[in-house]
Amino acid sequence: MTRPLNPADRQRLRTPANLWRALIPLLVIVGLVVLLNRPNGQSPDGVHVVDPGPAIAAARQQAGFAVLAPDGLSARWRPTSTELLPAGPSEAASFRIGYVSPAGQYAELFQSADAPDAVAAHYGPLTTDGTASVGGVGWQRYRTSSDRLLLRHTIGTVTVIVTGSAGQDELVELAGSLR
């Protein structure tokens, strides 16, 4: 059986070398935990980038309409989210991809087979703001209640919306990349 240390023995053992012997294993463990738990796909500016490919493929199989996807956007367009909502009793299926634009603004692509006005209603009250030319095709321009630009185009029964805090040039670039 060992006896408890008296105060003089405890003080004698409080050396910098003993402190480091106790701290080094703890620092190694903390370092490993941090290394193993670092976020994947996150850029230095905190943007979490996702691969939209699997979501686009799933949407093309499940949406019930021809899903358009961006093709030829530069790597500076960073997809951050995807969402596929299946058809419900009163709504058609819809598909959304969110991006951080090259200028660091938000841009969104939204598609649905619902009626154009029903799709646009997801964005609140809209004010007509003319048209924008996208690859020689006129898209309707609107302003949302939060003064964001919204571009809307209907292809057959599918309504496509491109909107966000990005400027018109970037929104037109995103809309023009759709195939």
Image (cartoon, grey):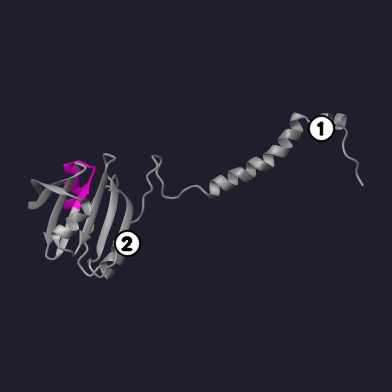
Q: Secondary structure at mark 1?
A: helix
Q: In the picture provided, is 135 more to the left or to the right than 93?
A: left
Q: Earlier in the sequence, mark 2 or mark 1?
A: 1
Q: What residue is rendered at 68% in x and 39% in y?
A: 24
Q: Residue at x 7, y 52 (%)?
A: 138
Q: Secondary structure at mark 2?
A: helix
Name the residue type under label 2: Ala
Image position of 15 with respect to 107: above or below: above
* Dot 1 alpha-carbon crowd within 10 angstroms: few under 14, some 14 to 19, many 20 or more: few
> Residue 143 versus residue 133: which sits nearer the camera?
143
From what the image shows, is residue 170 above or below residue 51?
A: above
Residue 80, position as x, y percentages in the image: 33, 50
The crowding category of the residue bearing disc 2, from other C-alpha atoms within 10 Å (few below 14, some 14 to 19, many at least 20), is some
**Segment tinted magenta in the rendering:** 162-179
In the rendered view of the protein, which quadrant contains the C terminus?
A: bottom left
The residue identified by callout 1 is 13
Question: Foreground residue, 95 or 78?
Answer: 95
* In this view, 164 is above or below 53: above
Left or right position of 153 against 88: left
Residue 31 vertical position relative to residue 8 in the rendered view, above or below: below
Residue 88 appears at what percent x and percent y?
A: 27, 68
Q: Is residue 7 magenta?
A: no
| C-alpha distance separating marks 2 and 1 | 61 Å
**Residue under the point 29% across and 51% down:** 98
- Residue under label 2, please give it: 55
Q: Which x, y percent locates residue 77?
A: 28, 47
Q: In this orientation, which residue lies closer to the viewer: 151 or 171?
A: 151
Residue 134 visible in the current orientation? no
Task: Using the rendered view, name the quadrant where residue 166 is placed.
Answer: top left
Choose top left, top right, bottom left or bottom right for residue 169: top left
Magenta-span inclusion, residue 171: yes
Rendering coords of residue 67 (x, y %): 22, 63
